[in-house]
Amino acid sequence: MNRRFFLLRGRFWVGCVPWAWMLVFFVLPFALIANVSLSTPELSVPPYVSPLHAEPGRALPEFRPDLASYGRLGDELRALREDGGERQYLQAYGNSLLLAGLTTLCCLLIGYPFAYHIARSREPTRNTLLMLVMLPFWTSFLLRVYAWMVLLDSSELGLINHALLALGLIDAPLQLLYNSGAVLVGMIYSYLPFMVLPLYANLVKLDVRLLEAAGDLGARPWTTFVAITLPLSQRGIIAGAMLVFIPAVGEFVIPDLLGGGDVLMIGRKIWDDFGPNQDWPMAAAVAVIMVLLLIAPIMLFYRHGRENGS
């Protein structure tokens, strides 16, 4: 009796760990950011007035939210109907979603064949290939981005431009750095392992007897892939897409270094408002909207998992 009691009690406390993690590292920080987004800008330290006002004689503080920051975002939405209206935040949201979507798609197209090859390799080769996938994580993230700056340098000293000039393929250096293409290349390179690893974990468990049976029945390799492999690897695709898309939307370092400030993304706007502009309520409102936009695909993934009984 005592052993069963302690076993159930131990399971309960172990089950509380992920919920406690979510509470401490997501719910509470998000509540603080949401509170700042509803505050009023002020020239003070910190540079805002909280919406919670303590009144003498009242046990609980009075809640007076300031929706001006959200109103500015609404004004930009209404300005879509006008020519020349200010839409810097919507432009940042659009650039972030577009580049994150392209990064996810390119990582899937590149990572799927790579993950499939790893999953079908012999075990010694498989371990070596997996180590190569994780090898970039052994170096600093900033060093890898700076390495791409050396490769994509738009002068004659850039390694790619230097090679193309030496081969006689171009007459003048190409503008490879400080544009959306450079940002996209850097993000694909940085986030590709996050697509390969969940795809590999799914494909390595694929029952090869299904593929052999399809071959025995006369199915061509492409038909077998479309009818069996691709549907059964759907969960790996969704998991990899989320691991790439969600952090890519809020990426700050890669657009700042490879985009040179010409590629406006939402991470940059949040940095500007929290830093030089000292407009913390606006930065917090932008962050809250971004989190709400990212919760939508997470809920779709959760619903997809429940519908498939897993």
Image (tube, grey):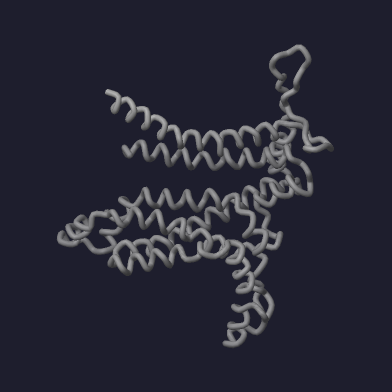
Q: Going by the picture, which residue comes out furthest to the front?
A: 2
Image spot of residue 153 (x, y percent): 66, 74
Residue ID at (54%, 65%): 139
Question: Which residue is nearer to you in this view: 92 or 310?
Answer: 310
Residue ID at (80%, 38%): 45
Question: Which residue is nearer to you in this view: 126 or 239?
Answer: 126
Q: Is 253 placed above or below 307 here?
A: below
Is residue 210 shown left or right of residue 87?
left
Image spot of residue 110 (x, y percent): 44, 64
Residue ID at (37%, 61%): 115
Q: Going by the picture, which residue comes out furthest to the left?
A: 216
In what quadrant of the picture does the C terminus appear? top left
Q: Is 16 placed above or below 111 here?
A: above
Residue ID at (15%, 59%): 217
Image spot of residue 71 (x, y percent): 72, 34
**Within the image, what quadrant is residue 199 found in?**
bottom left
Image spot of residue 236 (x, y percent): 38, 51
